[in-house]
Image (spheres, grey):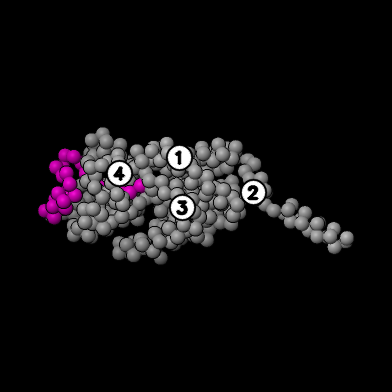
Amino acid sequence: MKRMCAALALMGAAIVSMPASAQDWPNRPVRMVNTFAAGGTADVLTRLVADHLTSVFKQQFFVETRAGAAGTIGVKSVADSPPDGYNFALTNITHLVLAPITNPKLGYDPFRDLTNIGYVAGSPIMISVNPKSGVKTINEFIELSKKSDKALTYSSSGVGSSGQLVAEAFAKLAGIKIEHVPYKGASQGIMDLVGGHIAFSAQTVSSTASYVRGGALLAVAHSGKERFADFPDVPTLKELGHDVIATTWFSISGPAGLPPDITEKMNREITRAVSKPEVQARLRRDGLIADPMTVEELKKHIEAETARWKPVLGQLGLIGK
């Protein structure tokens, strides 16, 4: 009897010592960090996921915008948080792949310091020109570049961004000279292209879509696997003979050590949120593709993207020391 009582006491102590997050999570509001500027694609995706989680878990998942340093400031704030299920961030290829390669002193390691939970959506890179340039196809663009005495200038959302990597990979395959003009975000670079100050832009479809629809820009190709139904006349780089397939993707991450049950619940609901037909239709209109992944699939995806882009960054001299 004494042994039984001792065993029961130990079981009770174990239950009491379990993290509250593993028993009744969430029992208070949860912070979702939007790591980019308010009003952009990242903000839209963060709120889309937060609204779904609020509805499902009956607790407020509130969005906090913490932009700066390409979003890595917001990511670090979550990496430094306790793993109790009350702090998450919208992460992307920059935070989990590119920035850790270009800046080893970033302040966090994407595998050691984060729990990467679920894939939200991704947007290919669109190569766009000013309609006044007279260029209407990618071949005309290549011809224009080869006739020019100077390298054609282009914008991306920053040094080491997926836009820069796609543009440089394409230029190498096409045998043309280009010059990167980095901006702190997509909008300023796009507006400089609209104003005729640069030759082309390499920005996400989601950032460029409204300008293309409005006629301010002309899209000549994008880096997706296949054409978009909303942009049926814009070919992929792959089908044009330039083997470049790439996506600027977004995911949800939390601090390292997050309880597995919370991780699985979050992954399941992120998948449900982006799998709704009405959400899929909305994302496609914005040039975004939802591609749900398990936690393990996301881990392998991050590893594969790291292995893929590190040599490209090395060729550009962007690997940090």
The label number, if any, that marks residue 276 in the structure image: 1
Could you classify mark 3 by the number of other residues whose Cα lies within 10 Å: few (under 14), some (14-19), or many (20 or more)? some
Please provide the residue range marked out in magenta. Answer: 123-147
The x and y percentages for residue 258 are 58, 54
Q: In whole angstroms, how far apart are the C-alphas of marks 2 and 1?
A: 28 Å
Magenta stretch encompasses residue 135? yes
Query: What element does badge 4 sit on?
Result: loop
**Residue found 45% across the figure and 43% down from its top:** 275
Residue type at mark 2: give it. Answer: Ser
Residue type at mark 1: give it. Answer: Lys
Residue type at mark 3: give it. Answer: Met
- The residue closer to the viewer here, 172 or 68, is 172
The label number, if any, that marks residue 228 in the structure image: 4
Q: In whole angstroms, how far apart are the C-alphas of marks 2 and 4?
A: 41 Å
- Judged from this view, the residue extending furthest toward the top is 214
Q: Which residue is mark 3?
A: 293
Q: Quadrant of residue 276?
A: top left
Residue 253 vs 56, above or below: the answer is: below
The x and y percentages for residue 313 are 34, 61
Residue 71 vs 51, above or below: the answer is: below
Q: In whole angstroms, how far apart are the C-alphas of marks 1 and 4?
A: 19 Å
- The residue closer to the viewer here, 138 or 198, is 138
The label number, if any, that marks residue 21 in the structure image: 2
Q: Earlier in the sequence, mark 1 or mark 3?
A: 1
